[in-house]
Amino acid sequence: MKKIKSFTFTIFLILFSVNFFSCTKSANQENTLSFYAMNTFMTIRSFGKNSKEANLKVQERIFQIEDELSVTKESSDLWKLNHSNGEPTIVSSETSLLLHFAVDLAKKTQGAFNPCLYPITSAWGFTNENYRVPPQTEIQNLLRYVDYNKIEFSKNSNQENQISLQKNMMIDFGAIGKGFACDESIKILKENGIESAVLDLGGNVQVLGSKKNSKNQNVAWRIGIKNPDQSSQLSAVAGLNLKDKAVVTSGGYERFFVGSDGKKYIHIFDSKTGKPVENEILSVTIISDSSLWADSLSTTLFVLGKDKAIDFWKNFSSQTLQSDFETSYPQIQDFDFVILTDDNSIFYTQGIKDKIFFLADFENKTLVTH
Ligand code: ADP
Ligand code: MG
């Protein structure tokens, strides 16, 4: 008992001194808020005298986005849409805009990115963790419901946004929801006067401004790229020094199952086959101004495979990606990537040439240029 008391007291002293320290340097005051939302663990760390209130506002906004975009909450726009039985459904302008973005990207990538795969991912058990390999006939049948061209956008007589899916179609924002939430969070932090922050929304990382080092100088944030070999002692294989950027990784190493055939099945799907993607990629990390873009492109480039992903980058980032899309979508000029492949190689693009550092011994390191 005595031991516990003195232990508690020590913790109290440490907390007290940390608190005292941060109060004395209010401009630099740090606040960290962690919570569970959108099926993942999230952490917001921001600096500045308004940081505590700002973090709480971000949390509130993320819960609101979850309520709107969740596929399991019965009051959400997506739930209503997925249970609409082919009838037009009224949704918020935000849901409509996001789905528009997803459909535009699907068209641009010939379905590599596809927001309509929910019937397929459900059949494989990724929505409730009852994993199974569905018979080919079942997959073939479900592939009839993944055509994003069949989504209709309209307004009703009250000028509300309506979406119509065909019967049996179902949408999910698993590949973009956290990215959207990240962009919205950064907006809120900025509106609340925060100039320095780092967010980690379940692997969607975004940094605002720079960070102060021990000498009170402004330096870039250091962000690690996870080792796809989760059994290794080395948790990150490379790192990036970045200011004001979103960094999103899609990997096949966190959500997967091993079938009775001994094969590994991951949670990213090929909408042509209705099966989990199988290619040489272990992970794709996208670095861009917007987390919505980074999130959607990390999934897209994973599906495309290494060679097509490189072509995609060459074709798109030489012009501006944004110019082909609605102006109301988040802004993005160019983007960069880091791709890890199963032959222990790393491919990275020229925009991050001076920002990347390597922590693992790679067989090949390839700088991708135009
Ligand atoms: P994570 O959510 O693990 O960070 P991703 O951003 O790559 O990973 O998104 C994967 C999720 O997106 C899947 O769980 C599924 O809900 C959905 N999804 C799977 N394949 C695709 C695809 N080809 N296009 C769009 N969304 C997909
Ligand atoms: Mg994604």
Image (cartoon, rainbow, N blue to C red):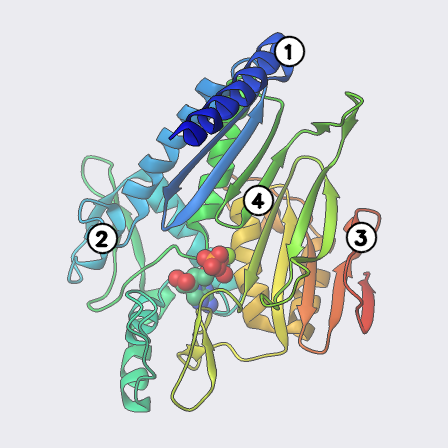
Q: At label 3, which amino acid type do we have?
A: Phe
User: What residue did someone put label 2 on?
Assistant: 79
Dot 3 alpha-carbon crowd within 10 angstroms: few under 14, some 14 to 19, many 20 or more: some
Name the residue: 82% across, 52% down. Answer: 353
Could one spot residue 131 in this view of the protein? yes
Please, what secondary structure does the residue beneath circle 1 have? loop
Query: Where's residue 39, x and y in %?
Result: 36, 51
Quadrant assignment, res 249: bottom right
User: What residue did someone put label 1 on?
Assistant: 25
Q: At label 4, which amino acid type do we have?
A: Val
The Cα atoms of the two marked residues, 4 and 2, are separated by 27 Å
User: Which label belongs to residue 205?
Assistant: 4
Query: Where's residue 216, x and y in %?
Result: 77, 20
Relative to 322, does residue 314 appear above or below in the rendering? below
Relative to 89, does residue 242 appear above or below in the rendering? above
Please, what secondary structure does the residue beneath circle 4 have? strand
